[in-house]
Amino acid sequence: MALRAPLEASHIAVLSGELENERNRDHFIELCRRFGATPPAPQANYHVADLGQIRVRWERHTEFTTYTFYREGPFAEPFREPAIGHVPLDWLHQLPGQLLVAVHLALEPASAAERDAASLAALCGSDRYVGSLMTGGKAVAWTDFRLNADGFVRILVRDRGLNHRQAGRLVQRLLEVETYRTAALLAFPLALKTRPQLRALELELTELTRRIAEVKELQAEQALLKALTRLDAETARLASQTSYRFGAAKAYYNLVRRRIAELREERIEGLQTWCEFMDRRLAPAMETCESVNARLERLAVRVSHAGNTLRTVVDVALQAQNRDLLRSMNRRVQLQIRLQQTVEGLSVVAISYYVLGLVGYALKGLGALSLGIDVEVLQAVSLLLVVPLVWAGVRRLRHLAVPESKAPPADPQ
């Protein structure tokens, strides 16, 4: 937007999530209708409306909505009569969502009286303000990033030769710096809350990993695997609760650094620059969030590795048990074969005994006919014939009952 000094702006950002697009649009349309202004087009995420004494810039982001109210014209003192004072209070109180950012910005012309440190401290709200030259020295901006009694952060800007477009870009960037800074810090309380839970999971994983090397019984291995599975599920739950917020914080922090780089700051002797303030206050919080996120990712990898290790140990133990079982089965089969061979030999002897008994009765009958047959010689000869025949018959019956496996054909290669 093209802006000119003197100007006062009030900027608010409302955290409303991704599912509140229609409610925020309808609420903004209601404001436009009250003042007879043109409402935004359907599906629009950006709109500027003229409300008479003020203009409003509405913009819908992924998880928050911003309203910036501009009032151009001279003012006796910055922040005494902010632009948002011309917005109906009932409409403000019914804003859908949770207030995230509230900023008053005053852009005073170069003709305004120079301000000393005491005047700047009174306007900003404290003497811990930062300030720097911006846009190649064509503007100066001061703020202390603190909430004042009215719940708004104050930013004072002095025009030193900005054209209308430069003034619009500078005001928008300063407001975006505060908006994205606050949005990035939404992840910091979550990181502080996650750290103790993460530490507890890390200690539990260390203990479970130590037990992997000591466990020997299958029951204990299964219990350990169950504990690792539960730990993996807990890690995944924690990651799903934090991944979106940490990812959003990283994106917002990158936007803050980009907007500050676009300000083209120059140092004012004795004052901290906006960039230095962010490096000292915002950067450590973002590093904490990144550290927690990195620890969470490493924990997930370690849990997966420990689970794979334990599964390998269990598989090796099962293979050893299967090997021992096969060896036991092999010994039993060998014993059965030996027993079968013993029984087979006894069967040959028993069958031969009964057959020889029958043959003996037959030979004795023939001897009683006085045919000149030597019964004892024939019995001895029958012994030599019966035993081999019985043995051959038993072997044949065994082969018919349990056929021998044929060897596979040789590989032609």
Image (tube, rainbow, N blue to C red):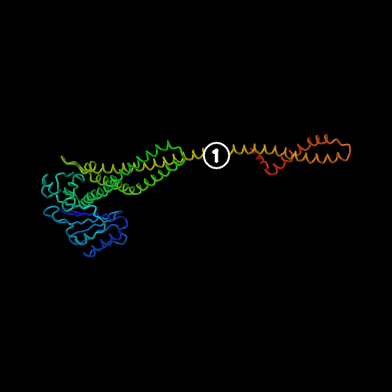
Residue under the point 62% across and 37% down: 335
Q: Looking at this view, name the residue that lies furthest to the right.
A: 371
Decide which of 268, 81 is in the foreground and name it.
81
Residue under the point 24% across and 41% down: 279
Q: Is residue 189 above or below residue 91?
A: above
**Residue matched to label 1:** 325
Decide which of 219, 370 is in the foreground and name it.
370
Residue under the point 42% across and 38% down: 212
Q: Residue 47, how many percent across, how many down?
A: 26, 58
Left or right: 194 with respect to 81?
right
Decide which of 341, 407 is in the foreground and name it.
341
Q: Residue 359, how many percent across, how many down?
A: 80, 40
Q: Is residue 219 above or below residue 97?
A: above
Q: Residue 53's image quarter? A: bottom left
Q: Residue 328, how many percent across, how many down?
A: 57, 38
Q: Is residue 46 above or below residue 188?
A: below
Q: Residue 1's image quarter? A: bottom left
Question: Identity of the amino acid at label 1?
Answer: Leu
Decide which of 244, 403 is in the foreground and name it.
403
Few, some or many residues within 10 Å of mark 1 (<14, 14–19, 20+): few
Q: Residue 320, how many percent across, how many down?
A: 51, 37
Q: Secondary structure at mark 1?
A: helix
Residue under the point 70% across and 44% down: 400
Q: Residue 16's image quarter? A: bottom left
Left or right: 4 with respect to 382?
left
